[in-house]
Image (tube, coloured by chain):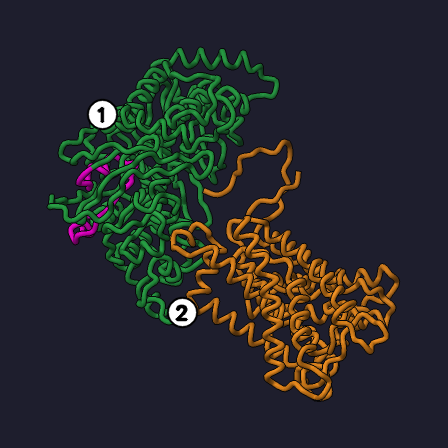
Amino acid sequence: MLELVPRAQPSRLMSWLSPVLAVILTAACGAVMFAAVGKSPLEGLAVFFLEPIGSLRGWSEIGVKVAPLLLVSVGLALCFRANIFNIGAEGQLVLGSIVAGAVILHFDDGSGGGGPWMIALALLAGAVGGAFWAAIVAWLRDRYNANEILVSLMLVYVAELLLSYLVHGVMRDPDGFGFPQSRLFDDGFLLPVWPGTRLHLGVVLALAASLLAWVLLARMFAGFRLTVGGLAPLAARYAGFSSRRALWGCLLLSGALAGVAGACEIMGPIGQLTPSVSPGYGFAAIIVAFVGRLHPVGVVFSSFVMALFYIGGELSQTRMGMPNAITGIFQGILLFALLACDVLIHKRFRWRLGAASTVRADGP
Amino acid sequence: MPPRLALDNISKSYPTVRANDGVSLAVQPGEIHAVLGENGAGKSTLMKIIYGVVRPDSGTVRWDGRPVQIDSPAQARALGLGMVFQHFSLFDTLTVAENIALGLPGDTDIHALEQRIADTVDQYGLELEPRRHVHTLSVGERQRVEIVRALLGKPRLLILDEPTSVLTPQAVHRLFDILRQLAGEGCSILYISHKLDEIRSLCHTCTVMRAGRVTGECDPRLETEAGLSRLMIGAELPVVERTSREAGDVVLRVSGLDLPRAHPFATPLRDISFELRAGEILGVAGVSGNGQQELMAALSGEDTRCAAGSIRIDGEPAGRRSAAWRRGRGLAFVPEERLGRGAVPELSLARNVLLSHQGEATVRRGFVREGAVRALAAGIIGRFRVKAPGPLALAGSLSGGNLQKYIVGREVVRHPRLLLVAQPTWGVDVGAAAQIRGELLALRDEGCAILLISEELDELFEISDRLIVIAKGRVSPPVPIGEAQRERIGQWMSGLWPGAEAQAGLAEPEAAHA
């Protein structure tokens, strides 16, 4: 019988390297996958991993994807550290885009309004929308002890249907030939971009969020409370830290960040409200958070890798005729590889002959 | 006749520690043989080697003169070894017989087994009903289940690991009678303990261990406690000086504290009342699991379900106040679990300071004052002689005793007005235990009110000014330490204090309503 036994002293170096190993393993699995469908593995990997970073355009497109991924995953990293499993960032992102879109559509009368204050207001509206959606989760958990994983996940579908309802109804462009989408926003309501690219202000906001989250965790007492609540709930109770406060704080903050990400999407690359504002950023950000070791700076790197997967996936569709599921497959393999690396860093396999005994023969 | 069990030059190393270093001992048939040593001296590792749980790096084990290699507990049992562990492995929801059947082959007939259990129980006067559910048993009775389990294997050598830590003094006497009877029938007994008086009254031979080595072998009946202690710790047992002093104002007043159980296996608290004054140590004696944990949680503010007025700190109702609020009023608390409650193992010692030091000195405008926190941690490490590389060492990397010193130190340096301490010297070596008791007395002399919960009667008698006893979620009336007698306190530990029945009778109708 094969069994897993804990290692006496898990290597610290290896646990730092685990995400890197996971990326390498993912690439190796990708090569096998390319070969299995009859494509050249080397060419496939080159298109997937190298081509996106071969040009300024490629880098800027990665930046466009990093913005929502990083904004969401910073919030999720804080949540997960506090053992609050908010799986529904996708829904919070959608709500953020709905509320921000509603504010813009209210003020944008097509006569060239907008400007910095209006953009700030729309971003704030996005934050409020996302936070509101997360607040439902917090309230149900706090009041009725409802499982936040299930509740937040199910609210994703509610949010998506709500968006669909609105763009088919009151938010539909009257001059849009019946297509389910809103008016295109006026330029004054769009985020500033790097000239010649689609790279927008959102990426700066995301980097700032990651920096602030790092300060919170590493330097502030509130961050300490949150960390203790996640690592040792009994110690948090001993210290007198309120678990309700941590629940509300983490959910509101991560909801707000997801909402800002949603607002940035419609005020950046999309420019209007459409039935689908996110290709699953809210879910991909869960993987980003774990690959980034739930560290606010670590997620900067992992969101880059995840953005690369999105761009690489698009490129291998157009260049090599790969199916569009490829991005999702790479994401899945990455998470699987990371979990496998972590298990093997903390445990090792042992081959055991005969009947398994319940008594472990190691450790004093 | 060859010895029943002979160990020759047994060594066992772990990555960070040499747990056994050339240990030899021989147990004769019918002999009660003590293995004496402090926590961490290597006693438990040695027993695990004998019982086949751990394999030694080198050395030989002889059984009735023949060399044997014991690879598993099953093999040890087949040889005729039985073991009663310090921590019981019993399922609360099963009966005594069912629990014992779990360790036997699957086709065991439960009725025949009940009969065998009843026979064994009669033979040794153990008083245990095979059909009772384990959750209805007292701790002493649970231990007897483990003993019966071991005896059914007809052992020729029985190992007991710190068996008295959960027993009242009366239950200890009964256990000793059973062990003497067993030895009289020719069964050898290995008795693991760090309690000198028990070993002197029970054992025929004593092997003393210190830091993984054997430091002496003697007949404990001929030795003084001081002599044994010299062998065990290399020095005389330190004595803590205590002067009597007048107690001041009431700091903590508990009156009519009732608390329903928070989970099915908790102990509900019933009508608890006592007063704690500034400058006194009130000891709480009792066998573990009688409501100590629940009482501590209610007093510390981790459990805020009790009526506001049932706990008053300096006269203010505090029953529903959070731990943080009570800490702000000068309360400090040393819980019995160090890892995960008193300290977060994954965080540094410096960070762990912040669990209880949350004032201006350590946190300013929401930011942690790193320098101040590290200085505080370094101060505690120095003053309490904590063996740690420095303030940045992870709490989880310290040994249990060292972490305990650190946590006690962390609470003591806050100069609390009211200190709650549970098991302050568990797993701590004798020297450090004396230091901790000394610090508690010094704090008392400064005027701090201290509530001390301990399972060690010696400790309670050494430093308390008054004693109360907790049993089945109720507390006895207080006794000044000068008038307290061990035997009587032992009786009270089973809930039999004067007026206890009246107390219970008064509370029953309430319980029926609840």
Determine the image quadrant of residue A166: bottom right
Circle 2 chain: B
> Image height check: is B489 above or below A109?
above
Which numbered circle lies on residue B498?
1
**Which residue is identified by label 2?**
B366
Crowding at dot 1, Cα within 10 Å, few <14 / some 14-19 / many 20+, comes out as: few
Q: Is residue A74 left or right of residue B211?
A: right
Q: Which residue is drawn at 84% across and 72% down?
A: A178
Q: Which of A161 and A58 is in front in this view?
A: A161
Read off the magenta span: B441-466
> Image height check: is B431 above or below B35?
below
> Image height check: is B323 above or below B85?
below
* Residue B15: image location, x then y, percent: 46, 49
- What element does badge 2 sit on? loop
Q: Which of B508 and B228 is in front in this view?
A: B508
Q: Is residue B178 visible?
A: yes
- Colour in which chain B is shown? green
Image quarter (top left, top right, bottom left or bottom right) of the C terminus of chain B: top left
* Residue B210: image location, x then y, percent: 32, 41
Q: Which amino acid does label 2 sit on?
A: Gly
